[in-house]
Amino acid sequence: MRVISADSSAALLDAKFTPLRIVASASVLVNPPYREPHSRLAKPIFEEAANGYEVIVHEAELCRDLLEKVKADVVHIDLSLGAVPLEEFSPIQLSNIKISGRAKQHLLTILPKLRKIAGEIRRKHGLEALAIGKESIPVRIAELTAGAEAILYACAKAVDEKETLLLGLPSKCQSMIAGSKVYLYSLMAAEHDVRGFAEDVNGILNKVNIVEMLNPVARGFRVLRIAPKA
Amino acid sequence: MRVISADSSAALLDAKFTPLRIVASASVLVNPPYREPHSRLAKPIFEEAANGYEVIVHEAELCRDLLEKVKADVVHIDLSLGAVPLEEFSPIQLSNIKISGRAKQHLLTILPKLRKIAGEIRRKHGLEALAIGKESIPVRIAELTAGAEAILYACAKAVDEKETLLLGLPSKCQSMIAGSKVYLYSLMAAEHDVRGFAEDVNGILNKVNIVEMLNPVARGFRVLRIAPKA
Amino acid sequence: MRVISADSSAALLDAKFTPLRIVASASVLVNPPYREPHSRLAKPIFEEAANGYEVIVHEAELCRDLLEKVKADVVHIDLSLGAVPLEEFSPIQLSNIKISGRAKQHLLTILPKLRKIAGEIRRKHGLEALAIGKESIPVRIAELTAGAEAILYACAKAVDEKETLLLGLPSKCQSMIAGSKVYLYSLMAAEHDVRGFAEDVNGILNKVNIVEMLNPVARGFRVLRIAPKA
């Protein structure tokens, strides 16, 4: 089963470790044994952290775009709604799901766009887009891939703006640089062999100093302090 | 404190990773330092995944059967009801416990049988059977032991039926073959030294090829693809 | 950001692994990268396990005392109330928070004392005391530090009273002795590099035998069996 999925992750933080902007989105193709991305598509977003729901629409678009390049059997969207097909998901079903009223309101706003993209994916590629969210390993691999790309985007921003940045990584993961690749390894239990990565084609990693620390006010999250080299 | 416990685990999956049948039950005796089984009793069950509650009765029977062979101080049943003694557990108490209505209905059905077995265990061995469930390390060791046995049962089935099978392992664990033993190691946080195992007395492991992968639609679960050798 | 925090942890257990008394409290100063204590202050408490809430007041006092010796930017109290400043926390706000009625009652009892200490800390040092609890890595480091000190206190008690003790460690951690230090390493996912420690200035570790086991009735908890050497 070949799975295409997408997620957005990593956030610029202020000095008190409060998230300001989500940095990157990525879609991935994940094949068995489902440990890392086979193909990837990423973009910087620097979206306000409060607009978390809007980015899901862009993630669905990134899935659709990746399907133009590679084949898959199913699409996993980062919405935890019991793995129902998005296209069949109606506002009535939403009322039966246990999420907060505010989350429901946000979902209602983006649902028409999501169903439209799900319809395009079905008509053009014959695939279902499932709202599977946190139960999906490909969604996790997309999250780690977006996070790895976010490190490169944040490094570029630090160099461009000659400024030190704090980058909050996705939940329970750790970065490792090897050659021209930056890997993001999951630190979740039973995910020790799950990772995402990004390729530093512009050599930006050579222009910064990176220090890892734990986020003191958010258990399970690590932070990179990225400073441009003098 | 010597603990006897039992659990059922591992499931045959279809091509979409949906559980079809629970494969094995096992009872174990666990002694300090509570890291692996000291004595074991297992059987293949291949029970429909939907009948999850029925298997608890058979698990209690396996505890009773193991008590014919080894001594213990207490019995742990895989029911998370606050570690109350099963024999004293009444339908009225059940109404005070926070579980879903459907789970309550299932429990009510099996409760008379469970209390009967608990009564036998108390009269014959003077031991209490506690409904402790997920708080118990011996229950976890029983789960890992049943999972290790399930690997052998599934291998035998694949060879007998000349068919490739997908076996879903218990939550957060990983198999390792060493000599004639198949171990199932916990991957849960703080359980790095907890494991179950089974003995391949029939040399069935030599007749199959096993590939491990992550379950793409169930975070934390691994899957073995078991194929008979040509 | 320099953080001062405090916690109490580790418990003497009876033969059935039921907690009897909480052993130690510790306050810590934690600096970036937030992996271990920079400065420490500890005391034995041997408080009844049922009085869990009373110890929070003493923890706040230990934070205040540590502030007499070292500088910090913020204080983290082990109360999970959404990181609100304790001094501003009113009984009315408490009614809006989702905790059990009994927990609320306990909190109401200690709130005046906590607010008094928070006021002293603000006036004297200009710092806020936040009720951040389980989201705080410094609170976790305080928990591990108190646990490491508790090992030494329990060893001294075992030697003094010529009695074997069972000491329940904090959740998901493991002790390691190196030279005259006893370390308590976190075993939580993504906390593999987080630890507390205590210094065995009296050489008490040479006078006991310590065996580690898992707590069979509390998943994720380890237990030390501490026996005085003959």
Image (tube, coloured by chain):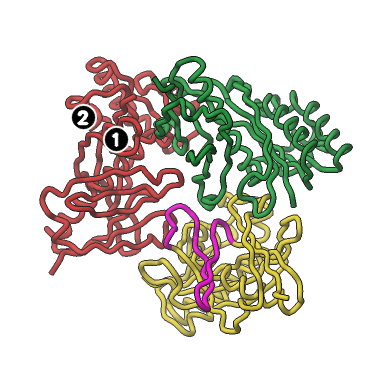
Chain colours: A red, B green, C yellow
View extreme (right): residue: B123
Residue A154 point in image, percent of width and height: 21, 54
In the image, the segment drawn in magenta is: C170-193
What residue is shown at x 72% (from left), y 46% (from top)? B3
Can residue C213 be seen? yes
Circle 2 residue? A66
On the image, numbered disc 1 is attached to which residue? A6
The residue at 67%/38% (across/down) is B40
- Lateral position of residue B211 relative to residue A31, left or right: right
Q: Is residue C47 above or below residue B144?
A: below
**SS label for mark 2:** helix
> Residue at 25% across / 39% down in the picture?
A26
Quadrant for residue C109, please give it: bottom right
Label 2: how many Cα within 10 Å (few below 14, some 14–19, many 20+):
many
Q: Circle 2 marks a residue in which chain?
A: A
Circle 1: is it few (<14), some (14-19), or many (20+) Cα within 10 Å? many
Cβ atoms under marks 1 and 2 closer than 8 Å: yes
Q: What residue type is labelled 1?
A: Ala
Percent of width and height locating residue A227: 20, 64
Queried whether the magenta region covers residue C192, the answer comes back as yes
Query: Could you give the CA–CA distance between mark 1 and mark 2, rounded to whole angstroms?
Result: 10 Å
Comes first in the chain, label 1 or label 2: 1
Q: Which amino acid does label 2 sit on?
A: Leu
Quadrant placement of the N terminus of chain C: bottom left
Seen at 23% across and 23% down, the residue is A71
